[in-house]
Image: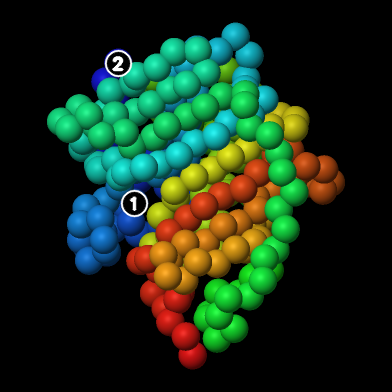
């Protein structure tokens, strides 16, 4: 199967998720970044691979790694079977998304020791965002995901939650320019259309020498009950001032 994320796809996913991180939707910003061109959302690539897996039931856990960028307009090939899947660039066979299903073991995320006290980013910093889950948004995302296969409502709901996590990371903490490197998630219960959900991210580790940030991730329903828990690894290389000591 060949999937090609167009700029229109990136713009649509940004609209549906709220993740308008300029590395995805602003060609001028992307040209000045380390990428050079706009790149696909990691959450969107994950959604495509989950759909391509054609599971009989929604996964209980997902672990996605993004070793290389997937550029807008670049053809990607789906490779894999069972619980291990990849999206590879057709032109050079480089993997842009590696997905493992139902193997993630939830771990307690402890906040490490402070490495650099004068950085704008601090251990323990947190950000959150809520949204109303509209049926029309689920339907639009289902149509986008259907290009790869399954459109099970629970799987589409998981994609909405991944998109909300991505939005907090890419728009708030660390902020615009954030590059997703890894997202591991344990799915606890499905979301319910017509209700609000909220995603929380908390910095658990900073690696200034590599411009890397580890964060815990949680999505809750409107009553504060967890729907998903996990952890993320991102690069803040292109986030203005993220690692500039004061």
Label 1 to label 2, Cα distance in Å? 23 Å
* 88 relative position to 101: left or right: left
Residue 18 position in % (x across, y down): 50, 51
Looking at the rendered image, the quarter that the N terminus falls into is top left
Secondary-structure class at tag 2: loop
Q: Earlier in the sequence, mark 1 or mark 2?
A: 2
The residue drawn where x is 60% and y is 63% is 205
The residue drawn where x is 25% and y is 43% is 71
Residue 196 position in % (x across, y down): 71, 45
Question: Residue placed farthest to the top in the image?
Answer: 56
User: Where does label 2 land, which residue?
Assistant: 1
Residue 39 position in % (x across, y down): 30, 47
User: Where does label 1 land, which residue?
Assistant: 24
Question: Residue placed farthest to the left in the image?
Answer: 91
Give the colour scheme shown: rainbow
Question: Residue placed farthest to the bottom in the image?
Answer: 246
Mark whose residue sits in front, 1 or 2: 2
**Is residue 223 visible to us here?**
yes
């Amino acid at each position: 199967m060949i999937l090609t994320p167009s700029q229109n796809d990136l713009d649509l996913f940004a609209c549906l998720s709220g993740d308008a991180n300029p590395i995805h939707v602003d060609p001028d910003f992307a040209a000045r970044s380390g990428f050079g061109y706009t790149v696909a959302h990691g959450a969107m690539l994950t959604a495509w691979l989950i759909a391509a897996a054609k599971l009989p039931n929604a996964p209980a856990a997902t672990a996605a790694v993004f070793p290389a960028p997937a550029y807008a307009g670049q053809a990607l090939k789906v490779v894999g079977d069972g619980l291990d899947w990849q999206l590879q660039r057709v032109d050079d066979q480089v993997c842009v998304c590696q997905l493992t299903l139902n193997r993630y073991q939830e771990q307690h995320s402890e906040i490490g020791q402070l490495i650099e006290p004068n950085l704008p980013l601090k251990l323990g910093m947190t950000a959150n965002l809520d949204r109303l889950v509209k049926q029309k948004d689920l339907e639009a995302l289902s149509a986008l995901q259907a290009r790869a296969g399954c459109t099970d409502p629970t799987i589409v709901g998981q994609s909405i939650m991944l998109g909300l996590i991505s939005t907090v990371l890419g728009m708030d903490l660390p902020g615009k320019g954030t590059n997703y490197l890894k997202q591991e998630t344990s799915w606890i219960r499905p979301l319910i259309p017509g209700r609000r959900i909220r995603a929380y991210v908390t910095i658990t580790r900073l690696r200034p020498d590599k411009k890397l940030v580890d964060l815990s991730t949680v999505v809750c329903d409107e009553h504060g009950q967890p729907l998903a828990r996990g952890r993320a690894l991102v690069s803040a290389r292109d986030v203005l001032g993220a690692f500039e000591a004061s």
